[in-house]
Image (cartoon, grey):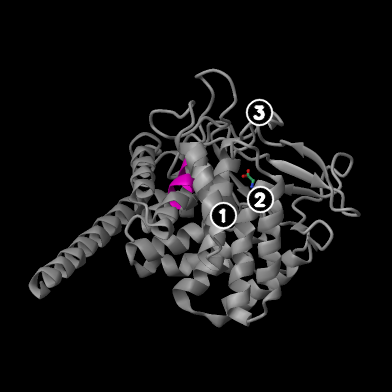
Amino acid sequence: MKKTFSILLMTVAITAHAQKATIKKQFKNLEPQVSLLLKEAPAAAQNGRNFPRTLENGKLKNVVSRDWTSGFFPGILWLMYEGSGDKKWLAPAKEYTEMMRKEQFNKGTHDLGFMMFCSFGNGYRLTGDTAYRNVLVQAARSLVSRFNQTTGVIRSWDHHQDLWKFPVIIDNMMNLELLFEATKYTGDSSFYKIAVRHADVTLKNHFRADNSSYHVIDYDPETGQVRKKMTHQGYADESAWARGQAWGLYGYTLCYRYTKDKKYLEQAEKIAAYILNHPRKTTDLVPYWDYDAPGDDQPRDASAASVTSSALFELAELSGKSAYRAQAKLILENLGKFYRSAAGSNSGFILAHSTGHLPAKSEIDVPLIYADYYYLEALLRSRR
Ligand code: GLY
């Protein structure tokens, strides 16, 4: 019995070791492409637009640090350091992270989780530098300044005030990670409580009977009542925008990670079932940009697939259900086989074929920096 157990332990250790080596090799293979982006980004930087986001008319398009996507490039550099084990990624990761420092005081957006957690959050996790942690705590303070006690949620956007009074988008679930972490760093439970309240109110109002989610819920900040249920980036108000479903899946999975509240795990599993059993599921599991956009020639969204893959790896771990891991792996493999930019092309973006905002005729069938970020995160999670 004892002998069988030690053989089993040895096999597990050997498998884990082999898996780690494979991932390291995969990161090494990605190095030329990410190095190209690192080389091209400064050339495209004008007027503070330091951060690569996508390609526009075939040319690299950078954005300023207050853009919601700014943190993904520093995040990619941190993940390259983690995945390859090569110290050469440290200096650029630190440099791009530093360029975001002032956003810790930005109270004009709910996207601080994306922006600061991907950059400073990975920096803190991988270096233990407490100066990074201090920035994250300040960013969490800025983020909770957008919380309203009456609605019980964090306001997403300040634009379109003619249309909405207090809009909250499903994407906002992603920003809660910063708040859960801020409570861990400081012992101040107010961040945690706000995150939980936001997750609960979103659970109540954002989901339909089939477990798909609306993109935007507009609240009345005086009464807390829901005013409108709409889309902004999806096909229709009643449709299921693909990336929104992925944000919800990832968001409720992370809420379960921090709280161990079963209702979040159940919600994550319901969303996973919606995505994985959808009648319009594509054969390669990379979804159309919106599940309800008609016809088979709709653009795909590789970013939705990479977020879903990463989330499913974690869901598999937390639920103990290996079927999620199998699906996560399949998505990751298909992205690698069919959605990778040809070597040396696309200014160094790893994945092609994402869709950012089709109704605005913007970012259709292009590389997007967050598709690459969650692809790398999924790769790292696949070794756990
Ligand atoms: N959070 C904005 C988007 O997913 O496009």
Q: Which residue is mark 1?
A: 252
Question: On the image, numbered disc 3 is attached to which residue?
Answer: 235
At mark 2, the secondary structure is helix
Q: Which residues are magenta?
A: 305-310
Q: Quadrant of the C terminus?
A: bottom left
Q: Nearer the viewer, residue 135 or 383?
A: 383
The reply, left or right, for residue 144 in relation to residue 300 is right
Residue indicated by mark 2: 203
| CA neighbours of label 1 inside 10 A, class few (<14), some (14 to 19), many (20+) | many
165 vs 339: above or below: below
Q: Quadrant of residue 215?
A: top right
Give the amino acid at mark 2. Leu
Residues marked 1 and 2 touching at CB (< 8 Å): yes
Residue 104 is covered by the magenta coloring: no
Residue 235 placement, left or right of 12: right
- The residue most toward the left is 3
The mark that comes first in sequence, 3 or 1, is 3
Left or right: 14 with respect to 45?
left
Q: Is residue 31 above or below residue 206?
A: below
